[in-house]
């Protein structure tokens, strides 16, 4: 199981944690919403809960709950410039498609067992 952050994401998240004056890292998760059914969540956290998986990325910790982990395994988190804004971009190998507005996604269907 892997989750990775770009250098830009590490820098942006670390700066936000320092600005807040506290924080352990970020919690990356999935919730049910939107046109396609699932959406990413990213929240700042002060620690790890029971059942969480912890990933390190430089000086930023990534925490993922057990339910979200299979849907996020192999994902890469980045911040990209779109116009005047830095936008969170998650490249998820488990996502089949995104809705037109980019707020939600579908998971790939599991391969049928032969």
Image: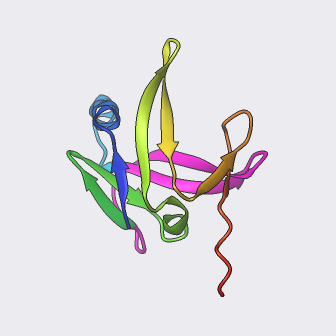
Q: Residue at coordinates 36% horizontally, 61% vertically from top-left?
A: 2
Dominant secondary-structure state across the stretch colored magenta: strand
**To which quarter of the image does residue 55 belong?**
bottom left
Residue 8 within the magenta-colored segment of the rendering: no
Based on the displayed image, in which of its 4 quarters is residue 102 positioned? top right
Q: Is residue 46 visible?
A: no
Q: In the rendered image of this protein, does residue 35 appear above or below residue 81? A: below
The answer to whether residue 40 is magenta is yes
How many circles with numbers are drawn on the protein?
A: 0
Between 101 and 28, the residue placed more toward the observer is 101
State whether residue 19 is above or below residue 1: above
Whole-percent x and y of residue 51? 42, 74
The scheme the figure's colours follow is: rainbow
Q: Position of residue 40 (x, y in %)?
A: 57, 48
Farthest top residue? 84
User: Relative to 8, is 87 on the left or the right?
Assistant: right
**Closer to us: 62 or 43:** 62
Q: Is residue 45 above or below residue 66?
A: above
19 vs 94: above or below: above
Which one is in front, 64 or 108?
Answer: 108
What residue sits 49% from the left and 45% below the top?
91
In which quadrant of the rendered image does the N terminus lie? bottom left
Magenta stretch in the rendered image: 26-52
Estimate the x, y position of residue 63 in percent, counting from the top left. 38, 58
For residue 7, side relative to residue 112 (left or right) = left
């Amino acid at each position: 199981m892997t989750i990775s952050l770009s250098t830009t994401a590490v820098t942006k998240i670390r700066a936000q944690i320092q600005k807040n004056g506290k924080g352990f890292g970020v919690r990356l998760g999935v919730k049910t919403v939107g046109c396609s059914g699932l959406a990413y969540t990213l929240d700042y956290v002060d620690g790890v809960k029971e059942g969480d998986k912890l990933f390190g990325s430089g000086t930023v910790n990534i925490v993922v709950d057990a339910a979200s982990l299979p849907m996020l395994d192999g994902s890469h988190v980045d911040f990209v410039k779109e116009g005047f804004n830095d936008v969170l971009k998650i490249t998820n190998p488990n996502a089949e498609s995104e809705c037109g507005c980019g707020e939600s996604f579908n998971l790939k269907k599991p391969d049928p067992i032969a």
